[in-house]
Image (spheres, grey):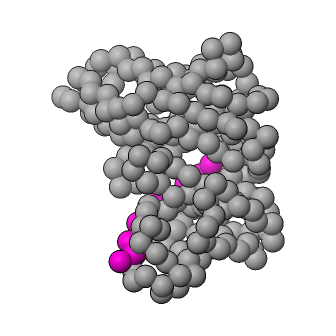
Amino acid sequence: GNSVTQMEGPVTLSEEAFLTINCTYTATGYPSLFWYVQYPGEGLQLLLKATKADDKGSNKGFEATYRKETTSFHLEKGSVQVSDSAVYFCALRASNAGNMLTFGGGTRLMVKP
Amino acid sequence: EAQVTQNPRYLITVTGKKLTVTCSQNMNHEYMSWYRQDPGLGLRQIYYSMNVEVTDKGDVPEGYKVSRKEKRNFPLILESPSPNQTSLYFCASSLEARANYGYTFGSGTRLTVV
């Protein structure tokens, strides 16, 4: 079946540091890939997505590139802020699984001033 | 404002007392889904619906029921709740079932069964 693996947290960074959260996936066919963010006490919000190989999704300074050859979709940001502290989920959606969204385990990011 | 609305946000109940968590979306989305989120287990899909009157089981459907009588509503029913159903529940919707559409999530319902 489909699966998503992301680095375990928490990831603790100082403000303005560079962020990378690794995400790799296993899926048959050609899934779409997503990053969601969950702030404390809230639901998940779509951060960015990519629907085919070599696509780059970007939003609010975050970026991720769909790499089919390495089955990866790593999340990056050049300069994090305290307000970026949240849990980040990598996910895929594929037609072979009823188009269900399959999530990774989540990575907690803590940014210190 | 385009949104998915869940109610209630918090609920404490006793074992065996039937309850319903409501979910409504105002975006005319075809696809709706319920997830539960548990520490160490991540997000797991309970049920989903591709359209009105079409529902199907996700990964963890035991102990839950759903219905989709109207496009906008997708209630989650626990006929006889048990303590292992204590969890954070999310309703989500997407425009269509196709893979390239992301989900819009509700704010969550924190359920405690004692």
Quick check: is B8 in the magenta stretch?
A: no
Quick check: is B104 in the magenta stretch?
A: yes
Figure check: A11 above or below A2: above
Q: Residue at x 43, y 63 (%)?
A: B87
Q: Position of residue A100 (x, y in %)?
A: 69, 47
Q: Residue at x 71, y 74 (%)?
A: B67
Q: Position of residue A32 (x, y in %)?
A: 69, 33
Q: Is residue A89 left or right of residue A33?
A: left
Q: Is residue B91 left or right of residue A15?
A: right
> Where, quadrant-wise, is the C terminus of chain B in this rendering?
bottom left
Q: Position of residue B25 (x, y in %)?
A: 63, 64
Q: Residue at x 79, y 40 (%)?
A: A96
Figure check: B44 above or below B114: above
Q: Nearer the viewer, residue A4 or A111?
A: A4
Q: Residue at x 48, y 86 (%)?
A: B17
Classify residue B88 by image quadrant.
bottom left
Q: Is residue A46 visible?
A: yes
Q: Is residue B79 left or right of residue A107?
A: right
Magenta region: which residues?
A: B103-114
Q: Nearer the viewer, residue A7 or B29?
A: A7
Figure check: B80 above or below A16: below
> Where, quadrant-wise, is the N terminus of chain B in this rendering?
bottom right
Classify residue A106 by image quadrant.
top left
Residue pushed farthest top? Answer: A69
